[in-house]
Image (tube, helix red, strand yellow):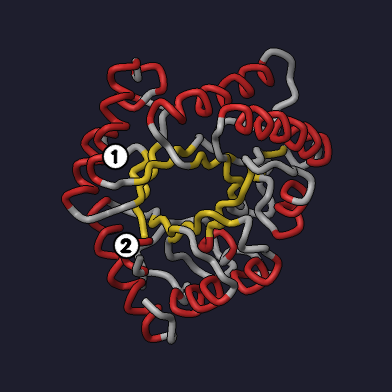
Amino acid sequence: MGLRDRIGIDIGRRAKLEDGIEWAAKNAVRFIDIQLDTAANALTTFDDRRAAGVRAACDKHGIQLGLHTLSAVNVAEYSPYVCDAVEEYLKAYIDIYSKLGAKWIVVHAGYHFTSDKELRMEAGLERLKRIAAYAESKGALILLENLNKEPEDAEVHYLAHTVEEWRYYFERIQSPAFGLSFTANHAHLVPEGIEGFVDALDMKMVFEVRLADCFRNGFEVHLKPGAGNLDFGDMFRRVEGKGFKGHYTNAFASLDDMLAGREHMVDAARKAGVAV
């Protein structure tokens, strides 16, 4: 499969899932992901009949579907009752996984409030271990994403936004149902950069690489390719050079912008000497 075909699209909340599948089929997009939290795509709207229709449409068009949990749900929650709800939320994504014929679920490490970072990390790690075990029992695959940095003086900070923090989780969770989703633009925001992340990663653990443009050591934005200063050619050269064989996911602007962005990225990879 050529590089263009390996670059998928993050539908997110941009379209009803069935419409997104049809759009992907029309535009020869082989990989899509969706968030199942609101409106027409809320988890609770998928009965057996609707889920079977989604699965059949993906099979018909040769589309691989991923699910993407909401980063606002704090996986590092430790408050009574609320922490149980977080766990049930993650399990619900796993439960619908096979009904929709999904291939992966992106999850997160949660966030802390500056003074409680260690406690939050411990709570999140133990929860992700349980969720990985649950996914394993259900034949699902969960992928832990490296999230973005927040301003230094912010009270709330996402966890797993540096190599060191991300490693805290992926070195301690041992399960065939657990892997990684590497967001290159998030790596571009921190000092170690994409180079540091790629050097630290075992690409056998990485099943997805997520893409958007942004500014080096800047703030969280998801820009179209060329609107920031991320060197996509160098990124592809490093990632592919480490043996990555999975799919990429464009996550910025509109569906049409992400579709057009594939051409920019393929061209950048070609110019960097990457086989496309």
Q: Is residue 106 left or right of residue 60?
A: right
Q: Secondary structure at mark 2?
A: helix
Q: Is residue 39 left or right of residue 116?
A: left
Q: Position of residue 117 (x, y in %)?
A: 79, 41
Which-is-in-front pick, marks 2 and 1?
A: 1
In the depicted view, which residue is nearer to us: 45 or 227?
45
Which quadrant: the N terminus?
bottom left
* Amino acid type, callout 2: Asp
Choose top left, top right, bottom left or bottom right for residue 228: bottom left
- Disc 1 marks which residue? 59
Residue at image location 48% in from the left, 59% down from the top: 246
Q: Secondary structure at mark 1?
A: helix
* CA gap, disc 2 and disc 1: 16 Å
Q: Is residue 55 left or right of residue 212?
A: left
- Disc 2 marks which residue? 5
Q: Is residue 232 above or below residue 181?
A: below
* Amino acid type, callout 1: Asp
Residue at image location 75% in from the left, 37% down from the top: 125
